[in-house]
Image (cartoon, rainbow, N blue to C red):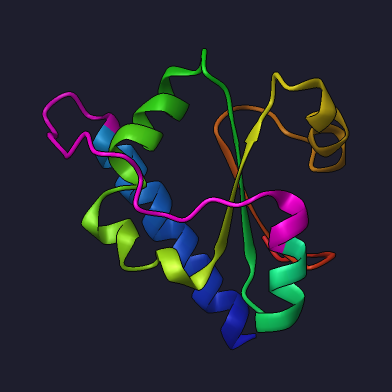
Amino acid sequence: MRGKILLAVILGTLFLVGALTLSPSHTSSTSDPTVQSTTLDQALTLSQVDAKPILLIFTASWCPPCQEMKKNTYPSPEVSTLADRFHWVFIDVDDTKNQWLLAAFQVEPLPQLTVWMAQELLY
């Protein structure tokens, strides 16, 4: 139960920071994300070894909120302090090889962040 509460707090922080960065009055760094992104296969393997959850980020190049979060939210200091608690996987919804993931996680709308623990959906 404590683990689920911690994940809810972390996800709430991600969404709050994302909402702040979408505000026109907010300025933030435009540097590359500080999170270490990996493939889903690698993340699954690593998660089984180190028990870190996988953060699936469903995104698209044509999605303005997705690009804004990639540009401002993920590299922000608030998110950077949490980055090492997850294996980050960015899923391009336009890539045909990812269509099964869109169906499996019922992705709609974008961006969608899903926490997954090596075969178990957490949030």
Residue 91 position in % (x across, y down): 65, 37
Residue at screen point 42% across, 54% down: 35
Residue at screen point 76% across, 77% down: 48
State the image quarter where residue 94 is shown: top right
Residue at screen point 16% across, 38% down: 28
- Determine whether, in the image, residue 78 is placed left or right of residue 69: left
- Determine whether, in the image, residue 30 is placed left or right of residue 36: left
Residue 72 position in % (x across, y down): 28, 38
Residue in front for this viewpoint, 80 or 111: 80
- Is residue 6 positioned above or below 92 on the image? below
Residue at screen point 73% across, 22% down: 95
Residue in front for this viewpoint, 28 or 31: 31
Q: What is the residue that sits farthest to the top in this orientation?
A: 62
- Is residue 36 positioned above or below 18 on the image? below
Residue 9 position in % (x across, y down): 45, 68
**Bounds of the magenta segment:** 22-43
Residue in front for this viewpoint, 118 or 11: 118
Instruction: Reply yes or no: does residue 34 show up in magenta.
Output: yes
- Determine whether, in the image, residue 79 is placed left or right of residue 47: left
State the image quarter where residue 120 is shown: bottom right
- Is residue 4 positioned above or below 41 on the image? below
Residue 42 position in % (x across, y down): 72, 59
Q: Quadrant of the N terminus?
A: bottom right
Q: Quadrant of the C terminus?
A: bottom right
Magenta segment's dominant SS is loop
- Determine whether, in the image, residue 9 is placed left or right of residue 68: right
